[in-house]
Image (tube, grey):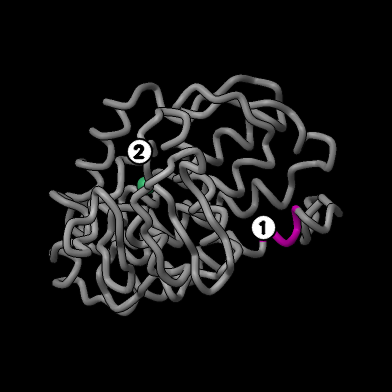
Amino acid sequence: MVARHDQTTDPELLAALLQARRGTAFFARKLNELTDAELDGASLLPGWTRRHVTAHIGYNARAIARLVEWAGTGVETPMYASTSVRDHEINFGATLSPIALRNLFDHSAVHLSVEWRDLPEDAWHHKVRTIQGREVPATETVWMRTREVWMHAVDLDNGATFADIPAPVLERLLTDITGAWKARGTDAGLVVKVTDRDLTFGDSTSASPTVVSGPLAAVVEWAAGRGHGGVTASGPAAPNGMVPAAPKWI
Ligand code: ZN
């Protein structure tokens, strides 16, 4: 008999699970608003239609579910056999019939939610490995999914914006993105200011940095490479206030 509620009782983890499930519901809503014909339309991601985004989100749930199963059983089951297998899978998924594509999204999302629900408390700390080779506790799978569903809901280009994403998710996203820049050293001379939260990220050592600032949602949209509406820039890399492109993130 499986439990009908999450096995974990950790309040922080339960809050994170709620954020992931809300994001999934939000993606579902934006997807369900699209007609079958509109699935063929372009997404915000270069070279990807809405079909690609939907297939990616479906296969992403399956890949993350494999990590949760790994944490639960101790039997190593990688996210994907390789990045080329992942890419091939997305391209294949994009050719599915609309009903099959929608089923892929729905079923994979439910499956992942059940895997999370039934994972015993202690197994959440078991280590698994992401496609990037990072060793993380199973708790990290919740964030991995959260950022995918919220951001790619915007990528469906169906009216969702970064302002629809909850502030805690936006803040963690910005922490991830600026952390990736720092790890690669691509944030040299760049400071990012979140005006409505009093948060500052980026290179604190530069005497004359380029400063990109704006409200949280706009700053994250810019940092994620999705546009520069609502942000302003000044400094050496921003002649006449022209907002520079954000460093690459993934
Ligand atoms: Zn993605």
Q: Is residue 16 magenta?
A: yes
Q: Residue at x 49, y 70 (%)?
A: 195
Taking 218 as reference, is 67 left or right? right
Does residue 84 appear in the picture of this structure? yes
Q: Quadrant of the C terminus?
A: top left
Residue toward you, 196 or 208? 208
Farthest residue in the front direction? Answer: 207
Residue 37, x across and y down, in percent: 14, 72
Mark 2 element type: loop
Residue found 25% across the figure and 46% down from its top: 93
Q: Amino acid at mark 2?
A: Ile
| Residue pictured at 58% horizontal, 59% vertical | 20
Q: With respect to residue 103, does 79 lie above or below? A: above
Q: Amino acid at mark 1?
A: Leu
Location of residue 241 in the rendering, given as x and y in whole percent from the top left corner: 22, 64
Judge by depth and name the residue closer to the eye, 242 or 90. 242
Marks 1 and 2, how far apart at CA: 24 Å
Q: Which residue is mark 1?
A: 17
Total labels drawn: 2
Q: Is residue 162 left or right of residue 176?
A: left
Kindly identify which numbered label has been placed on residue 246: none
Count neighbours of disc 1 (C-alpha within 10 A) and say few if under 14, some if 14 to 19, many if 20 or more: many
Vertical placement of 218 versus 245: above or below?
below
Using the rendered view, name the quadrant where residue 72 is placed: top right
Q: Which residues are magenta?
A: 13-17
Name which quarter of the figure residue 156 lies in: bottom left
Who is closer to the viewer here, 27 or 173? Answer: 173
Residue 250 - label: 2
Q: Could you tell me what secondary structure mostly forms the magenta stretch?
A: helix
Q: Secondary structure at mark 1?
A: helix
